[in-house]
């Protein structure tokens, strides 16, 4: 249980930093409630594991209580048990708990963490703790957390944690669809039918129970729950999608009817409701309490600019997805929203994966041409879906061998056509050509894992928050993996569409700079700052793997500390054992070709001023500054360039300062010695910067430790945060008297030794520090 104990210590740190955005954790009278520990579906059934988890969390609760000065403990914990394990009487169905919002996953090992204090923390240790937390100890970070500030130490011993055992069951979904009069605007009802058919024919998994309710001024049950066991079950539900729009908007009526439909067969705990609306409803808050008590998860789809502003509250309070689709048909937002609604608890091999989603408005018999890559990890249940707004287009499709594909099912009423590829689709590049005049076409391609034992390449995208207040930047993330292995060097872009219909394209990067915390971990990130209005924004991510893409083999995580060849003791160099060789197989250079699209949900922006929007965004913080001795007395600096606005554009200038005291440089940066940077012209964001200088007006001789930091400045004089601190040391070992060589020996002078810190993050290596320092991990 050692590896799992480490996971819980990491959980402790996450709790004290603040619960994650999709977590159910809440602090109640010093006790943390709503903690979810999920056993990975691939873990073999083992009843003793459950008791081990209980024992470990109980011990960790006592540890947490003592480590935090009797402030916090674990109050209740839910253990999520795989559906594949045997059912038992004490296993109950989960409510809001899912694998997606689990706080701890029992799977692979993670390294230990322990708390340090301001008194015993080594600020010069070359580790991720210092890198991410600005030289602060773990206890200082905990002490600054919001949870810490609003609690006091407990005077009595808390009770042991209580546990509930939750087992995943069959998926239960009820569609709650708006068919009010406003849905007749802008072809919305027809688009709802297209997206609904994709969900029913492809996205929802076999074995799921699905029902359907529509609403206008009142609710109407279109179909009671039926289990999806065949294509005919899917067709039955698809035929019940609404055909006409009229009446007002009563969202609560639709929700209450859905609860009734579900309760005819199952409790609402853990069930899902997909709620779509385009209208306002000032009575929606009237059913908030019923929603909370139901235990159901509400996924919301806001369609158009006038959907109820309170809609997102339903998804927030229940842990559901929130999405937004504009009236810009070519962006395919509504189909993307429904395509993202795969099960949060089902096996990944059963989930629908979107390979492509695009649209185009054509004029004068133009063609919409393109390709879709079907890689070896997918191919089962591959579906090509085409929609149009006026007349059926000409559709041409060729498989990778050049064979033309036919047999599209055409639905002229819904204005869509689809083709299900039988068996496993051929691996390679599929080509398509669509021709039409004066209308908008969209193409969507979905598939499933080709083999239950081969994990498919997946793209999971999200933002760091679901509400953003100007001028606070938003971060967009895309996590690309095959199983647990990250996919590196993919081409990843995010398309962010505002309620005004303006779309901004961001290139997401995995370079360890700007918004990206760690280089080459398969998580691609970028700041978003180009707000143009208040209201909802949708996020969509496209990922392509080609010549440069590679898969990294999963290896046990290692300490973030820099390897030190040796240290000085009594003027003699003591050498550490050689650093283990990096396994060249860790990054598998075999070409990984794939294409994926993924909905990143939506967010709501506020306080955005009217145009022209002022420049209130500073350059991003430099986090990868490195320094080394060059030519004996020069210092060579390298870093990734920030931008004018975080990691976009080009900064105006750099301020570089140096000091022989790391704390003075951190705390009194503006008073530290400034380096002449007249010849240093900033490059465009994410470019590599190199700067060579000679320290002046400061002692730099044998034994000198010199610390360097940078600040970027934009054209309106906004300054970035101070960079990580890099360090160089100059050490010239004492010369020993030369010995007379034997005839078969030659002698050579001992060269000067220049030791430099080159790790990313807080480069504060105490080079002469013996390698027995702390090996703390980042908790930021």
Image: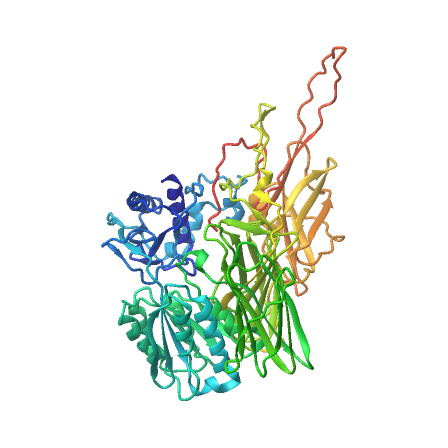
- Residue 94 in the image: above or below residue 759: below
Count how many numbered circles sit on residues in the image: 0
Q: Position of residue 174 (x, y in %)?
A: 36, 72
- Residue 633 in the image: above or below residue 319: above
Q: Is residue 236 visible?
A: yes
**Which residue is at a point 37% across and 59% down the rendered structure image?**
98
Q: Position of residue 381 (x, y in %)?
A: 49, 63
Q: Nearer the viewer, residue 539 or 122?
A: 539
**Which residue is at a point 77% across and 10% down the rendered structure image?**
743
Q: How is the image coloured?
A: rainbow
**Which residue is at a point 53% across and 84% down the rendered structure image?**
186
- Is 698 left or right of 271, judged from the image as shown? right
Q: Position of residue 562 (x, y in %)?
A: 56, 38
**Which residue is at a point 45% across and 74% down the rendered structure image?**
196
Q: Is residue 603 visible?
A: no
Which quadrant would the N terminus be assigned to in this image?
top left
- Is 623 left or right of 282, judged from the image as shown? right
- Is 172 left or right of 243, judged from the image as shown? left
- Residue 768 in the image: above or below residue 41: above
Q: Quadrant of residue 765?
A: top right
Q: Position of residue 456 (x, y in %)?
A: 51, 54
């Amino acid at each position: 249980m050692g590896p799992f104990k480490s996971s819980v210590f990491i959980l402790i740190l996450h709790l004290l930093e603040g619960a994650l955005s999709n977590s159910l954790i809440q602090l109640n009278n010093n006790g943390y409630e709503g903690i979810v520990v999920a056993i990975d579906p691939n873990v073999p059934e083992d009843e003793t594991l459950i008791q081990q988890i209980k024992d470990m969390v109980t011990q960790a609760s006592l540890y947490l209580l003592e480590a935090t000065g009797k402030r916090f403990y674990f109050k209740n914990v839910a253990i999520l048990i795989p559906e594949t394990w045997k059912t038992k009487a004490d296993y109950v169905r989960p409510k809001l708990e899912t694998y997606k919002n689990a706080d701890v996953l029992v799977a692979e090992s993670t390294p230990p963490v322990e708390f340090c204090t301001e008194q015993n923390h080594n600020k010069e240790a070359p580790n991720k703790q210092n890198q991410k937390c600005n030289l602060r100890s773990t206890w200082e970070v905990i002490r600054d957390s919001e949870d810490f500030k609003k609690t006091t130490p407990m005077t009595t011993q808390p009770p042991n944690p209580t546990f509930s055992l939750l087992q995943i069951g069959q998926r239960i979904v009820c569609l709650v669809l708006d068919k009010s009069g406003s849905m007749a605007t802008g072809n919305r009802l027809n688009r709802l039918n297209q997206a609904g058919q994709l969900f029913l024919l492809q996205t929802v998994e076999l074995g799921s129970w699905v029902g359907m309710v529509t609403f206008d001024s009142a609710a109407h049950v279109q179909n009671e729950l039926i289990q999806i066991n065949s294509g005919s079950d899917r067709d039955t539900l698809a035929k019940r999608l609404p055909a006409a729009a009229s009446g007002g908007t009563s969202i609560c009526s639709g929700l209450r009817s859905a609860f009734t439909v579900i309760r005819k067969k199952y409790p609402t705990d853990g069930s899902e409701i997909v709620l779509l609306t385009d209208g306002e409803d000032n009575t929606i808050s009237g059913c908030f309490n019923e929603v909370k008590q139901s235990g159901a998860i509400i996924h919301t789809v806001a369609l158009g600019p006038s959907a109820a502003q309170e809609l997102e509250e339903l998804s927030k309070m229940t842990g559901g997805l929130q999405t937004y689709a504009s009236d810009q048909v070519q962006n395919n937002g509504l189909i993307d929203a429904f395509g993202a609604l795969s099960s949060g608890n089902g096996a990944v091999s059963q989930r629908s994966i979107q390979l492509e989603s695009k649209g185009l408005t054509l004029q004068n018999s133009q063609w919409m041409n393109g390709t879709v890559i079907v890689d070896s990890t997918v191919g089962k249940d591959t579906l090509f879906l085409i929609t149009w707004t006026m007349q059926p287009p000409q559709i041409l499709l060729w498989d990778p061998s050049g064979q033309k594909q036919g047999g599209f099912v055409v639905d002229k009423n819904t204005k869509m056509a689809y083709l299900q590829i039988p068996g496993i689709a051929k691996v390679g590049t599929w080509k398509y050509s669509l021709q039409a005049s004066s209308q908008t076409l969209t193409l969507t391609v979905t598939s499933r894992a080709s083999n239950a034992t081969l994990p498919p390449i997946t793209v999971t995208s999200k933002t760091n928050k679901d509400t953003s207040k100007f001028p606070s930047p938003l971060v967009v993330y895309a996590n690309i993996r095959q199983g647990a292995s990250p996919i590196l060097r993919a081409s990843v872009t995010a398309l962010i569409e505002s309620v005004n219909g303006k779309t901004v394209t961001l290139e997401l990067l995995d370079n360890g700079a700007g918004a990206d915390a760690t280089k080459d971990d398969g998580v691609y990130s970028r700041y978003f700052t180009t707000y143009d209005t208040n209201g909802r924004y949708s996020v969509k991510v496209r990922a392509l793997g080609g010549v440069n893409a590679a898969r990294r083999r999963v290896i046990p995580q290692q300490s973030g500390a820099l390897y030190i060849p040796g240290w000085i003791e009594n003027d003699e160099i003591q050498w550490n054992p050689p650093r283990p060789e990096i396994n060249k197989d860790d990054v598998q250079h075999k070409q990984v070709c794939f294409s994926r699209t993924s909905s990143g949900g939506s967010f709501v922006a506020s306080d955005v001023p009217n145009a022209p929007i002022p420049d209130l965004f500073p350059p991003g913080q430099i986090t990868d500054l490195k320094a080394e001795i060059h030519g004996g007395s020069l210092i060579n600096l390298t870093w990734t360039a920030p931008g004018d606005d975080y990691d976009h554009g080009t900064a105006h200038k750099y301020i570089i300062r140096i000091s022989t005291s790391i704390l003075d440089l951190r705390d009194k940066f503006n008073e530290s010695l400034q380096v002449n940077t007249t010849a240093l012209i900033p490059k465009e964001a994410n470019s590599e910067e190199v700067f060579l200088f000679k320290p002046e007006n400061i002692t730099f001789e044998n034994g000198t430790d010199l610390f360097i930091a940078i600040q970027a400045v934009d054209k309106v004089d906004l300054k970035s945060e101070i960079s990580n601190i890099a360090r160089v040391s100059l050490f010239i070992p004492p010369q020993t008297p030369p010995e007379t060589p034997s005839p078969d020996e030659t002698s050579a002078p001992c060269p000067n030794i220049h030791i430099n810190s080159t790790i990313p993050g807080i480069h504060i290596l105490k080079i002469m520090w013996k390698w027995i320092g702390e090996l703390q991990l980042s908790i930021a």
